[in-house]
C-alpha cells in the first residue's frame, strides 16, 4: 500500500513541529500510560506511543473485519460451551503445557461441581493483518482472537482526535474528516452493564481484577467511567486481595469486602507469571461463584492458540455452528494456514515444511501478551530440538502473514520521531452476553489499529513494539 503522506514524511523540520503538536494533543485527549519507572503511580504519566499519521487501510477489509465479528462472537461462545470439543482439542496440549493444564483443571472442577453462573459475558478482540497476495490485492487474515483482557479499547477512542488534529494543522480538512470515530470502551461497558443488569441485584458491583503494576490504567478507567455514568460501581482488586477478602455464600454468590459482585472483569490472569499458588486459589474461587466472569475459564480456553488451530480443520466450524453456512464461510475466509504439531505424521509433515521454508512460518506456544512466538533461525533451532519430543504438542505452527510495508512516523516518549517502514494489525472488538442458553447481545463495538516497524516480528503496544494508530480508509 502506498501512503498519502509520502512527501510529508521527508520534511524533517515539519515532522518535528507536527510531532510536538501531536504529542500535546495526545496528552490533552488522555492517550496516556503510566511510566515504566513508576507503574503503580498516576503522579507521573506520559503519552502512549502512536503514529504521527493514520495508516491506509482498504475500506473493504475494514468492512470485512467488522462483518465477521459477530460470527467470531458466536464461535467463541459455542466453543466455550462444548466441553467435548475443548477436552479433545486440548488433550495433548495440557500434557505438555502446565499453564493450560491449570486453567483446564479449574474448568473441570467447576463442571464437576456444576456451573453456578447463569449470565455469560464475552469481550473479545479479533486481530488481523493484511496478507499481500500475488495479484497485489491484500487479504484479511486473522492473527488471533483475544478472549481475556483485550486491551486498548479505551485509548483507541481518544486517538482519532489526535490524527484529525495533525491533518487539520496541515489544512487537510477533507482527509481529517475521513478518520473514523471509534468508541470501543463505551461498547465494552454496555456489555458489562447488560451482564450486571441480568445478574439482577442493584446493589451488586463490578469487580475489575487488576495487576499491582498497571501502566495501562487509563485504558481501563475509560470503561470504568462509562459504567459509573450508568450508576454501576466498579471496584479494582488484585488476585491477592481476593484470596484475602473474597468469599462465597451458600448460593455461591461472590462477596468482596462484604460487597456482592455481579460481574468479574479480568485485566489480569492471562500469563503464567501472573499466578502464584494463592492467585490460582483466588481464580478458582471466582470461577466457582455465580458472578458473570469476563471471561469464564472455558472462554479463556476457547482463546488458546491450540483451539484456533483446531478450528481451521475441515468440518470443525460446521460442527460448532450448524445450519450457518454463511457465517462459516465468512470465518473461514479469514483463516491463515494453521498446523498441529501433535506427535504423528501430520505434525512431522508440518515440521518438515517449516524447516524447508522457515521464513514462511511462525511457531507459537500457548501464551498471550506478545513476545512469545518464534521466527526464522530461532524457530528452526526450536523445531529441531522439539522434533522428537512430546513437548512439541504445546506449540502450533502458523503461516506467516506478510503485509506490504509502508512508511509512517512513530512517536514514543523519550525517543526522537522516527520515520520507518511499518506494518499494521487491525483489531475488532466484539461483545456478547448470554443468559442460560439465550444470546441477548451480539455486537461489534469498535476497532484498534496498531502499527510497528517491520524489523520487529512480534509484540504489541504493551510489549513496547507496536504503537497506536488509526485506519485511514481507502
Ligand atoms: P499474543 O497472544 O502474544 O499477542 P499473537 O498471536 O497475537 O500472540 O502474536 C503476537 C504478534 O506476533 C502479533 O501481534 C503479530 O505482530 C505477530 N504475529 C503473530 N502471528 C503472526 C503471523 N502468523 N504472521 C505474522 N506475524 C504474526
Ligand atoms: Mg496478539
Image (cartoon, grey):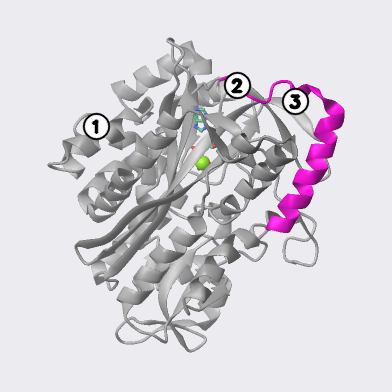
Q: Which of 292 and 324 is in front in this view?
A: 324
Give the Cα distance between marks 1 and 3: 40 Å
Q: Mark 3 points at which residue?
A: 9
The mark tally for this picture is 3
Task: Say what secondary structure mark 1 lies in.
Answer: helix
Can residue 298 be seen from the camera position used here?
yes
Disc marking residue 329: 1
Q: In this view, does 11 lie to the left or right of 76?
A: right
Q: Which of 46 and 29 is in front in this view?
A: 29
* Residue at the (68%, 56%) spot, across then down: 29
Q: Which of marks 2 and 3 is in front?
A: 3
Quadrant in which residue 173 is drawn = top right
Residue range (magenta): 1-29
**Which label's residue is closer to the chain start, 1 or 2?**
1
* Residue at the (27%, 49%) spot, across then down: 74
Q: Where is residue 408 in the image (x, y as percent from the top left)?
A: 68, 29
Can residue 373 be seen from the camera position used here?
no
Q: Is residue 184 left or right of residue 371?
A: left
Give the Cα distance between marks 2 and 3: 15 Å
Q: Mark 2 points at which residue?
A: 405
**Which label's residue is closer to the chain start, 1 or 3?**
3
In the rendered image, the residue lying farthest to the bottom is 258
* Residue at the (75%, 44%) spot, across then down: 22
Q: Do the residues labelled 2 and 3 touch (CB within 8 Å)?
A: no
* Residue at the (78%, 51%) spot, across then down: 24
Amino acid at each position: 500500500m502506498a501512503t498519502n503522506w509520502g512527501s510529508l514524511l521527508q520534511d524533517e523540520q515539519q515532522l518535528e513541529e507536527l510531532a510536538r503538536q501531536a504529542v500535546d494533543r495526545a496528552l490533552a485527549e488522555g492517550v496516556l500510560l503510566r511510566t515504566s519507572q513508576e507503574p503503580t503511580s498516576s503522579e507521573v504519566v506520559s503519552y502512549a506511543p502512536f503514529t504521527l499519521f493514520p495508516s491506509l487501510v482498504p475500506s473493504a477489509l475494514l468492512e470485512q473485519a467488522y462483518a465477521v465479528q459477530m460470527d467470531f462472537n458466536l464461535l467463541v461462545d459455542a466453543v466455550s460451551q462444548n466441553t467435548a470439543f475443548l477436552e479433545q482439542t486440548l488433550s495433548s496440549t495440557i500434557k505438555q503445557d502446565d499453564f493450560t493444564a491449570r486453567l483446564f483443571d479449574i474448568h473441570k472442577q467447576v463442571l464437576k461441581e456444576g456451573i453456578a453462573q447463569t449470565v455469560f459475558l464475552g469481550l473479545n478482540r479479533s486481530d488481523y493483518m493484511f496478507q499481500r497476495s500475488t495479484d497485489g490485492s491484500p487479504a484479511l487474515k486473522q492473527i488471533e482472537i483475544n478472549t481475556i483482557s483485550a486491551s486498548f479499547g479505551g485509548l483507541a477512542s481518544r486517538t482519532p482526535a489526535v490524527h484529525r488534529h495533525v491533518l487539520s494543522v496541515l489544512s487537510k480538512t477533507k482527509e481529517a474528516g475521513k478518520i473514523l470515530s471509534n468508541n470501543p470502551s463505551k461498547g465494552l461497558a454496555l456489555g458489562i452493564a447488560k451482564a450486571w443488569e441480568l445478574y439482577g441485584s442493584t446493589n451488586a458491583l463490578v469487580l475489575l481484577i487488576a495487576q499491582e503494576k498497571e501502566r495501562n490504567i487509563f485504558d481501563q478507567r475509560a470503561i470504568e467511567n462509562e459504567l459509573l455514568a450508568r450508576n454501576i460501581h466498579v471496584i479494582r482488586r488484585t488476585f491477592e486481595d481476593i484470596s484475602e477478602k473474597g468469599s462465597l455464600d451458600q448460593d455461591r454468590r461472590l462477596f468482596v469486602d462484604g460487597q456482592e459482585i455481579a460481574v468479574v472483569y479480568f485485566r489480569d490472569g492471562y500469563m503464567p507469571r501472573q499466578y502464584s499458588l494463592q492467585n490460582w486459589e483466588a481464580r478458582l474461587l471466582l470461577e466457582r461463584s455465580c458472578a458473570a466472569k469476563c471471561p469464564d475459564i472455558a472462554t479463556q480456553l476457547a482463546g488458546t492458540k491450540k483451539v484456533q488451530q483446531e478450528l481451521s480443520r475441515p468440518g470443525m466450524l460446521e460442527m460448532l455452528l450448524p445450519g450457518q453456512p454463511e457465517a462459516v464461510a465468512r470465518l473461514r475466509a479469514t483463516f491463515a494456514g494453521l498446523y498441529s504439531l501433535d506427535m504423528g505424521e501430520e505434525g512431522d509433515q508440518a515440521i518438515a515444511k517449516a524447516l524447508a521454508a522457515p521464513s514462511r512460518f511462525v511457531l507459537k506456544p500457548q501464551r498471550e501478551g506478545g513476545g512469545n512466538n518464534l521466527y526464522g533461525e530461532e524457530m528452526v533451532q526450536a523445531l529441531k530440538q522439539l522434533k522428537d519430543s512430546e513437548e512439541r504438542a504445546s506449540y502450533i505452527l502458523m503461516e506467516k502473514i506478510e503485509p506490504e510495508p509502508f512508511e509512517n512516523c512513530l512517536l514514543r516518549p523519550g525517543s526522537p520521531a522516527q520515520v520507518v517502514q511499518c506494518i499494521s494489525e487491525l483489531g475488532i472488538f466484539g461483545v456478547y452476553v448470554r443468559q442460560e442458553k439465550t444470546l441477548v447481545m451480539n455486537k461489534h463495538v469498535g476497532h484498534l489499529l496498531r502499527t510497528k516497524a517491520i524489523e520487529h516480528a512480534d509484540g504489541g503496544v504493551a510489549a513496547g513494539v507496536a504503537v497506536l494508530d488509526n485506519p485511514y480508509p481507502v
